[in-house]
Image: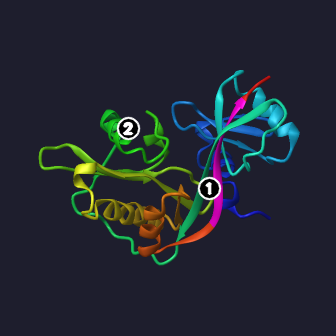
Amino acid sequence: MTHPLDDPAWNSLHGAHARFAVVHGRAARYDHEVAPFHALSDPADPKAWDDLADLVPLGEAVVIPGAGGAARPGWEADTRIGGVQLVATTLRSEPAPGAVPLGAADVPEMLDLVERTQPGPFRKRTVELGVYLGLRSPDGRLIAMAGERLHPPGWTEISAVCTDPGFRRRGLATRLVRAVAAGIRERGEIPFLHTSARNETAIRLYQSIGFELRKSTDFTQYRRTR
């Protein structure tokens, strides 16, 4: 048996996130407004890629976490980002004073913060994937946020961790990560996260607060060519 985190997108789309899934045979994807991720039952299976082609218009780019980056017949890999997957082992989880839940009404501010900080993919319905928490400045501006994304059985990914550049080095992101993790653990699940393998600063931070490296992975963008 494979581990749920070996293919968290596939396991999420066939579990807790089935309501956001578009499935065709051995391929699946999130609703375009929710997340950019696609998944295959087995990236080594040509038939899974054929099924994916039925879900993807010619020329459209897709992101398939952990597929390895090699080109398949009818597809080309045009962007590959090396990543790492970390799991919470000794992370202290606790509520964050001042943190507020974020929802649909906050999406314009969330998208603006994401655009300025580039924590990773975030779309106008990503907020529906789980709990999102934010911190606001005294004048009410959203200055930091973090929330839940992939949700394979027994695990929940912490994602969209970002802080306005003018408010960094104050520990706001760490406070929110601990708070999101507290909610995950209350459900009896384990927090995990992904980040770029090149982002050594983030990796060191996550390891310093109680995350442990589980594996290296990749986030490759493929484009259908025929």
Q: Is residue 122 left or right of residue 102?
A: right
Q: Residues within 10 Å of mark 1 (few under 14, many from 20)?
A: many
Say which quarter of the image contains residue 35. Answer: top right
Q: Main secondary structure of the magenta part?
A: strand
Instruction: Measuring from the top left, give residue 123's x and y in whole percent.
Output: 46, 35
Q: Is residue 175 magenta?
A: no
Q: Residue at x 12, y 49 (%)?
A: 138
As rendered, which of 68 and 190 lies closer to the eye? 68
Q: In the current view of this chain or complex, which residue is farthest to the left? A: 139
Which residue is labeled 1 in the image? 152
Q: CA distance from mark 1 to mark 2?
A: 27 Å
Q: Is residue 77 left or right of residue 115?
A: right
SS label for mark 2: helix
Which residue is labeled 2 in the image? 115
Amino acid type assigned to the residue bearing label 1 in the image: Pro
Read off the magenta span: 215-223
Asked which colour scheme the image uses, the reply is rainbow
In the depicted structure, whether residue 117 falls above or below residue 94: above
Q: Residues within 10 Å of mark 2 (few under 14, many from 20)?
A: few
Amino acid type assigned to the residue bearing label 2 in the image: Glu
Instruction: Measuring from the top left, give residue 137's x and y in whole percent.
Output: 17, 49
Q: Is residue 154 left or right of residue 23?
A: left
